[in-house]
Image: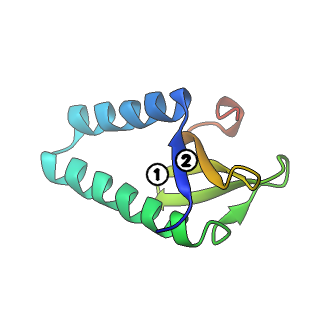
């Protein structure tokens, strides 16, 4: 087992938005594939939290691409030994909209 993962309220909301988008525009297979990919990503994150690109602006924060349209922003909290999921961002949006 690795580091504990904690979802922030914003992470839950933005994940739900991504699922809602898939429900409107895609099939159940794509929803299943996306959630499976997120689960695989989180498992990797628990064992290798430094694997993904480090944010240049915010300390202990990393950004990883889950699929080409969606990335996850997360923070490593070394003192509490947790990973805090901050938000899921849509890579197709204007970067100014993706405030962290």
Report the front residue among 78 and 15: 78
- Dot 1 falls on a residue whose secondary structure is loop
Q: How many labels does the image show?
A: 2
Rendered view: 48 above or below 34: below
- Tell me the quadrant of the picture where the C terminus can be found: top right
Residue appearing at x 75%, y 56% in the figure: 78
Labelled pair 2, 1 in contact (Cβ < 8 Å): yes
- Lateral position of residue 1 relative to residue 54, left or right: left
Residue where numbered disc 1 is placed: 69
Residue appearing at x 55%, y 47% in the figure: 91
Q: In x, y percent, where is residue 48? A: 59, 72
Q: In x, y percent, where is residue 59? A: 84, 50
Q: In x, y percent, where is residue 70? A: 48, 50
- Lateral position of residue 74 relative to residue 36, left or right: right
Residue where numbered disc 2 is placed: 91
Quadrant location of residue 60? bottom right
């Amino acid at each position: 087992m690795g580091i504990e993962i904690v979802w922030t309220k914003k992470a839950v909301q933005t994940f739900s938005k991504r699922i809602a988008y898939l429900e409107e525009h895609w099939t159940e297979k794509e929803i299943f594939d996306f959630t499976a990919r997120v689960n695989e990503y989180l498992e990797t994150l628990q064992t290798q939290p430094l694997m993904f690109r480090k944010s240049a602006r915010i300390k202990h924060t990393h950004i990883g691409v889950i699929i080409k349209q969606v990335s996850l922003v997360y923070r490593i909290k070394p003192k509490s030994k947790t990973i805090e999921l901050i938000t899921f961002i849509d890579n197709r949006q204007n970067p100014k909209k993706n405030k962290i």
